[in-house]
Amino acid sequence: VAMADVAASKLAEGTRVAMADVAALEAEIDRLHAYCERHGLNSRGVSDIVGREFALPVDAEHKATVLQVTTAAQPHMRAFHLAWLGFFSTFFSTFAPAPLMPYIKPALGISKREAAVAGMASVGSTIFFRLIMGLVADTIGARRGMAACLLVTTLPILGMMYVQDATGFIVCRGLIGISLASFVACQAWVSVMFSKPIVGLANATAGGWGNLGGGITNLAMPFVFLAVRDSFAPGDDDAAWRLCFWLPALLHFGTGLATLTGRDLPDGNVDELELSGAKQKSRSDVVLKVGFSNLNGWLLCVLYGMSFGVELTVTNEAATYFFEYHGLSVKLAGALASCFGLMRALSRASRAHPETAALTQRRP
């Protein structure tokens, strides 16, 4: 009996030691997983509901916990890159006429007042359609809303090549401006793909890179005009500026088709998940009621309207201002006007980055 007690005691002690070793090993493995996940590796091999392994580490909702912009892997980073590129395309096309106004105004006989109306139409038309896009994103998914926005507005971009007067120009700019509703799809799509600690940075980066379209178009379109005129329409300014709109049209069409290759949610597309019962079907009436009854939403609406309104106005008018009031060349006027938009490459993302935010909020 004594020997049995000693053996049992030794066995119990060995078990405790073994369990402690196992616990330490498990803790070490968890630390190794955490290190790998911080560096963008899905070391745990987490998969979606149909068994497709994620390329990035994810949380319990299968939202990515890191932003790895050097990859376009499904579903998280593919959605991220398609979201900002779609928004970029619409900004590029909406403001493509702005740096070309020195050529467009005399060709169509556009007055200063009519040019201003066209500018307002290009940004005013998006207000109502952004509300619609929010409803679309909540019911059928931001991916399809983005694709529809890009593909449908390809037509008025092509229409710019055939306008003959100020009225046609104003109408086309207004219809193209509808595409700026892609911003809603961009932010909604990114929001469902990234976890709370990183979603602010992901949204800010996608929005900032999308806003770059306004700067790039002011910079690029004068050079596109010169290249087109020299290659396809020597000495014909009127034909050259019209042909320039093939570029934003192709950008819309190509990006719209590419958007369809993405995924609505980390685990699949909305219709597939609703059909399988993995996702409850969204009710549009509930979405509208919650949205319109949120006081914070209305306050943010006012703040965003005042700040974004200034941004759109400057992007629309800066090139014309430098050309008409300072006598600069079209190329130089466009280059200076682009500086305003190019700042968004870093300004949004840097403000949302946790380390930068901490620095900007630190008290002296």
Image: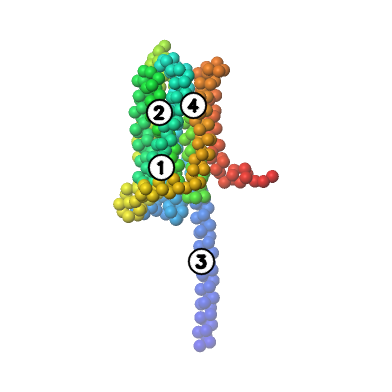
Graded by Cα atoms within 10 Å as few (under 14), some (14 to 19) or many (20 or more), the crowding at tag 3 reads few
Q: Is residue 332 left or right of residue 122?
A: right
Alpha carbon separation for disc pair 3 and 4: 65 Å
At a point 44% along the width and 46% down the height, the residue shown is 291
Which is in the foreground here, disc 3 or disc 4?
Answer: 4
Disc on res. 134: 1
Q: Quadrant of residue 131?
A: top left
Q: What element does badge 4 sit on?
A: helix
Residue 57 vertical position relative to residue 115 in the rendered view, above or below: below
Query: Where is mark 2, residue-wise?
Result: 174
Determine the CA span between mark 4 and mark 2.
13 Å
Which residue carries the number 4 mark? 316
Q: Amino acid at mark 3?
A: Val
Sequence-first disc among 1 and 3: 3
> Which residue shows up at 43% across the image and 52% down it?
62
Q: Crowdedness of circle 1 by 10 Å Cα count: few (<14), some, many (20+)?
A: many
Dot 3: element: helix
Question: Which mark sits nearer the N-terminus, 4 or 2?
Answer: 2
C-alpha gap between disc 1 and disc 3 = 50 Å
Q: Distance from label 1 to label 2 (Cα)?
A: 20 Å
Label 2 amino acid? Gly
Q: Mark 2 or mark 3: which comes first in sequence?
A: 3
Mark 1 falls on what kind of element? Answer: helix
